[in-house]
């Protein structure tokens, strides 16, 4: 048995017995981990109610060779992002970030993925209380990119012709845009929608008054076809409905 200390983000928690919790963590030094936090649900727990999704801390836990579930010893707060639940929009996007990491992070340390996750959660947390159209889809696109997936938004996925600012169609199974000749029927993105999609997919916030009504849906569809791999992500339907 050895003692490990690592920076960690709580992705999800599950009740375990009357007083304990199991946590899914993304750690900087070990990658994704599961830990048991004994007594975390007791009123005077030494964890002080901090073991909630999006919170980041220095986690110390006992690991045992060949065991997947470690035992949490302490958790020193680094960033408290519990206020994200004040906005449905921001909470939804933060949940998508955590669920994507939980389902798709490789089983080894991945510093870039860790930094992308924490930067996204910080960016979202910084927008709490900022009013309408909080945005934040660019953080999900950034994480999608860090996981190794990128949509083709410059060339037609069928004929490879370069697509400028004309109206194009997002072919989700193919993972990118179809030019007007290769998609003669069906709904198309307007030039403004395409510009916003390109900004978000490059990790930049939408300019002006928010991302527009369909950007959450398109992002959810891209994830569903390319990242979810048959797994149903619980947060995706909420992402699709973000206006
Ligand atoms: Zn084409």
Image: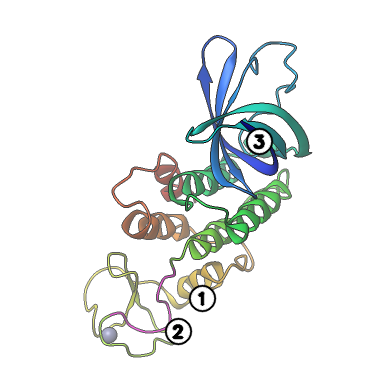
Residue that carries the numbered disc 1 in the rendered image: 195
Q: Image quadrant for the N terminus?
A: top right
Q: Does the magenta-highlighted stretch encompass residue 152?
A: yes
Q: Are marks 2 and 3 in contact (CB under 8 Å)?
A: no
Position of residue 218 measured from the top left corner of the image (x, y, whole percent) = 40, 60
Q: Is residue 41 above or below residue 47?
A: above
Q: Are marks 2 and 1 in contact (CB under 8 Å)?
A: yes
Image-based side of 46 in relation to 202, left or right? right
Tell me which corner region of the image, top left, top right, bottom left or bottom right, holds residue 238.
top left
Earlier sequence position, callout 2 versus callout 1: 2
Residue that carries the numbered disc 2 in the rendered image: 165
Q: How many other residues sit within 10 Å of disc 2, few (<14), some (14-19) or many (≥20)?
A: some
Position of residue 44 measured from the top left corner of the image (x, y, whole percent) = 75, 12
Residue that carries the numbered disc 3 in the rendered image: 86
In 3D space, how far apart are the residues under numbered discs 2 and 1 (Cα atoms)? 7 Å
Q: Residue at x 24, y 69 (%)?
A: 186
Viewer-nearest residue: 222 or 75: 75
Q: Residue at x 21, y 74 (%)?
A: 185
Viewer-nearest residue: 77 or 189: 77
Label 2 beta carbon within 8 A of ligand 1: no
Q: Which residues are magenta?
A: 150-157
Image-based side of 200 in relation to 185, left or right? right
């Amino acid at each position: 048995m050895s003692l490990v200390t690592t920076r960690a983000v709580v992705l999800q928690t599950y009740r375990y017995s009357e007083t304990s919790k199991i946590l899914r963590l993304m750690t900087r030094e070990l990658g994704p981990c599961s830990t048991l936090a004994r007594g975390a649900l007791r009123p005077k727990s030494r964890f002080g109610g901090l073991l909630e999704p999006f919170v980041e801390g220095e986690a110390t836990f006992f690991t045992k060779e060949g065991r997947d579930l470690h035992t949490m010893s302490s958790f020193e707060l680094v960033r408290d992002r519990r206020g994200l639940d004040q906005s449905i929009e921001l909470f939804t996007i933060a949940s998508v970030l955590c669920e994507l990491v939980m389902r798709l992070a490789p089983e080894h340390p991945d510093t870039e993925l860790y930094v992308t996750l924490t930067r996204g959660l910080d960016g979202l947390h910084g927008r709490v209380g900022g009013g309408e159209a909080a945005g934040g889809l660019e953080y999900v696109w950034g994480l999608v990119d860090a996981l190794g997936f990128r949509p083709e938004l410059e060339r037609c996925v069928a004929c490879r012709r370069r697509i400028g600012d004309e109206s194009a169609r997002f072919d989700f199974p193919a993972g990118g845009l179809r030019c007007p000749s290769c998609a003669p029927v069906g709904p198309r993105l307007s030039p403004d929608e395409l510009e916003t999609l390109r900004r978000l997919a490059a990790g930049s916030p939408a300019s002006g008054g928010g991302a527009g009504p369909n950007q959450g849906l398109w992002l959810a569809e891209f994830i569903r076809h390319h990242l979810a791999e048959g797994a149903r992500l619980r947060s995706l339907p909420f992402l699709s409905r973000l206006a």
